[in-house]
Amino acid sequence: MTITSIRNDKSRRVLELGHEDGSTVEISHETLRSGCRCSACTATRRAGGAPAADAAIALELIAPVGVYGVQLTFSDGHNKGIYPWQLLQELAEMQAA
Ligand SMILES: [Zn+2]
């Protein structure tokens, strides 16, 4: 489904994605941070670890990356992650499951 809106709810620490049919899904900031696919976090994951994310992590900034997706900046200063729309959908489905 096409994502038509994206909203950062800082008080609840969730990212809300809106779809063209009006439905919405939420992804917690913690899930977003631990789902980062940047080279450093991917290397950590390949080594059997997990990117550092705790329940207090917060998403600070959302920057558009063309039509491709968004770049997210977190409260721990991490801003290397590019999140394609497809990845956001996957994280939302993973969290819902
Ligand atoms: Zn990362």
Image (cartoon, grey):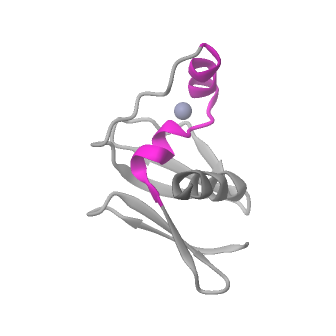
Q: Position of residue 17 (x, y in %)?
A: 54, 69
Q: Position of residue 43 (x, y in %)?
A: 62, 19
Q: Position of residue 60 (x, y in %)?
A: 37, 52
Vertical side of 41 occupied by 75: above or below = below
Name the residue rendered at 39%, 34% in the picture. 53
Name the residue rendered at 58%, 16% in the picture. 48
Q: Quadrant of residue 13?
A: bottom left
Residue extending farthest bottom: 21
Q: From the image, which quarter does the N terminus lie in?
A: bottom right
| Side (left or right) of 94 relative to 12 | right
| Side (left or right) of 59 relative to 79 | left
Q: Position of residue 18 (x, y in %)?
A: 57, 76
Viewer-closest of 92 and 65: 92
Please give the range of residues in magenta.
27-47
Name the residue rendered at 53%, 58% in the picture. 96
Residue 59 inside the magenta-drawn segment? no
Most frequent secondary structure within the magenta stretch? helix
Ligand 1's quadrant: top right
Q: How many marks?
A: 0
Vertical side of 55 occupied by 97: above or below = below
Vertical side of 41 occupied by 24: above or below = below
Q: From the image, which quarter does the C terminus lie in?
A: bottom right
| Side (left or right) of 58 relative to 95 | left
Name the residue rendered at 59%, 51% in the picture. 94
Residue extending farthest top: 47
